[in-house]
Image (cartoon, rainbow, N blue to C red):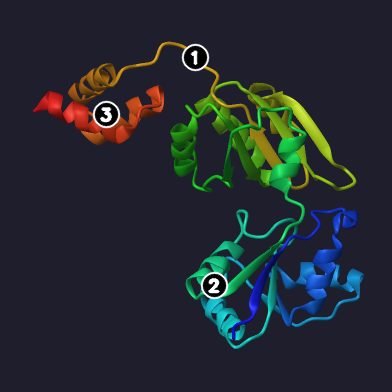
Amino acid sequence: MSGKLYVVGTPIGNLGDMSERMVQTLSDVDFIVAEDTRVTSKLLSVLGIKKPMISYNGYNKDGRGSQIADRLMSGESCAVVSDAGMPCISDPGTELVSLCTELGIDIVSVPGPSALTAALSVSGMFTGRFAFEGFLPVNRKNKLARLSEIKSFEHTLVFYEAPHKLPGTLLDMLEILGDRRICIVREITKIYEEEIHTTLGEAAARYAEEPLKGEIVLIVEGNTDTGPQVSLSDAAQTAAKLIEQGLSASEAAKRVAADTGLKKGDIYRTVMKLTE
C-alpha cells in the first residue's frame, strides 16, 4: 500500500501563523520534501523536529520526482513544503503533485498561509474575480506579450515580483496596461509589512529612484475601459491595412488583438478571408 503525500502550508514570515495540524504532520511523516532544505531546517529547528529532507526545486525536480514517488509507492509518507506559504502556488511542488496524481498516490492538503490570498484581502481591490499570473516572463519581449494578452481582462490581476525587477515591471505595465490603480503588498506577515495603494504611473516614477525590499505581491486593477467595442469585421479591416503596409498577416493580427482585446486567431482568419 502506498503512502501519502501531504501538501503542507508553512508560515510566510510570522511563526504565529503555524497550525497544530501543520506541526503534527511534519512530526509524523517519514521524510520532508523542501524547496530549499536550508530554509526548512530553520523552521524544523524551532519546532524541535528532526526529519530526513530532500530538496526539490526548479533545478533538480526532473530527477528527484521519480525518486520521491518510488518511496511513496513503497509505503512511506512525505510532506512537501515551500520556502514559505502554501506549496504548489508558482512553485515546483505542483509537478510533484501532478506526478503523484498520475500514479494514484493519495494527496492530502494541510492548508496554511498564502501570500496570494493574504495580499488580496488587504488590497482594497475587487476580489470577486481575479487572475493569478504568478511571475511574469523574465524575457522582456515575452513579458510585454503576456501583458498584451491580459490587458483587456476586467478582473483584478495578481502578480508575484522580485524587488530588483519591480521598477522595470512597473514601467512595462504602465506602457501596456495604462495608468491603473495598484496595491503593492510587501513582506506580508513580517515586521516590515506594508500595503502601498497607488497607481502604476506614480509607482513607476517613485520606485525607479527608491527601490523596495522584500517579497512583493503586486495587485493591479482590471480593465475599466467601457468605451465602444471594436467589431471583428472592423478589426480585420485594420489588420488588412497593416498588411498593405508590409506586415505579415500574423503580426498584423497580433497587433490589432493587443489593441482591441479580440482574439488573434479570430482576427487572422477573418482578415485572410478578406484578402483571398
110 horizontally vs 75: left or right: right
Q: Where is mark 1, residue-wise? A: 226
Crowding at dot 1, Cα within 10 Å, few <14 / some 14-19 / many 20+, comes out as few
What amino acid is at disc 3?
Answer: Ile
The quarter of the picture where the C terminus appears is: top left
Does residue 211 appear in this view? no
Q: Residue at x 83, y 54 (%)?
A: 13
Instruction: Say which label, 1 or 3, has the lower sequence index.
Output: 1
What amino acid is at disc 2?
Answer: Cys
Give the quadrant of residue 265: top left
Give the quadrant of residue 193: top right
SS assignment at label 1: loop
Marks 2 and 3, how far apart in space? 41 Å
Q: Residue at x 71, y 31 (%)?
A: 183
Instruction: Say which label, 2 or 1, has the lower sequence index.
Output: 2
The quarter of the picture where the N terminus appears is: bottom right
Disc ID at residue 267: 3
Q: Residue at x 75, y 58 (%)?
A: 84
Give the quadrant of residue 211: top right
